[in-house]
Amino acid sequence: MYTEALQENEKLKSRLQDSKQELVRIRSQLEKVTQRQDRISERSTVLDTERREKQALEKRVSDMEEEIKVLTELKSDNQRLKDENGALIRVISKLSK
């Protein structure tokens, strides 16, 4: 009976050792998966940030293009007013003679 108990004990020790090794292997796999998920999450965050930055830059470019249009119109209006002013000065000059 003692030898049977020893044999059973050895079997259980062997199973326990196998279970410990499998646990280590599974923990290692879990760690790898967790790290992979973290990297994916970081990439996703970076992509979201880059997308927001791109949208902000696109809006800024659009705003600047609109400002350029307005500035062009203002320059054109300014030149027209200068021309009209010059013409009025010539008319006033002729009338005052």
Image (cartoon, grey):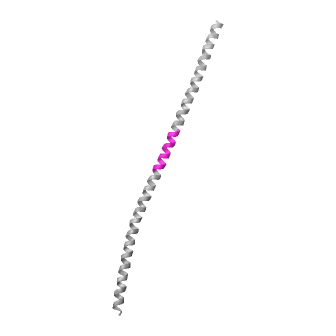
Q: Quadrant of the N terminus?
A: top right
Q: Position of residue 79 (x, y in %)?
A: 38, 75
Q: Where is residue 96 shown, x and y percent of the image? A: 36, 92
Residue 14 horizontal side relative to residue 37, left or right = right
**Residue 56 vs residue 13: left or right?**
left
Q: Where, quadrant-wise, is the C terminus in this rendering?
A: bottom left
Query: Residue, x 50% and y 46% (percent of image)?
Result: 46
* Residue 7 location, quadrant: top right
In the figure, is residue 30 to the left or right of 65?
Answer: right
Q: Residue at x 43, y 57 (%)?
A: 59
Q: Residue at x 47, y 47 (%)?
A: 48
The answer to whether residue 49 is above or below residue 39 is below
Which residue is farthest top? 1
Vertical position of residue 5 compared to residue 66: above or below = above
- Give the percent coordinates (x, y) of residue 47: 47, 46
Q: Which residues are magenta?
A: 38-51
Majority secondary structure of the magenta segment? Answer: helix
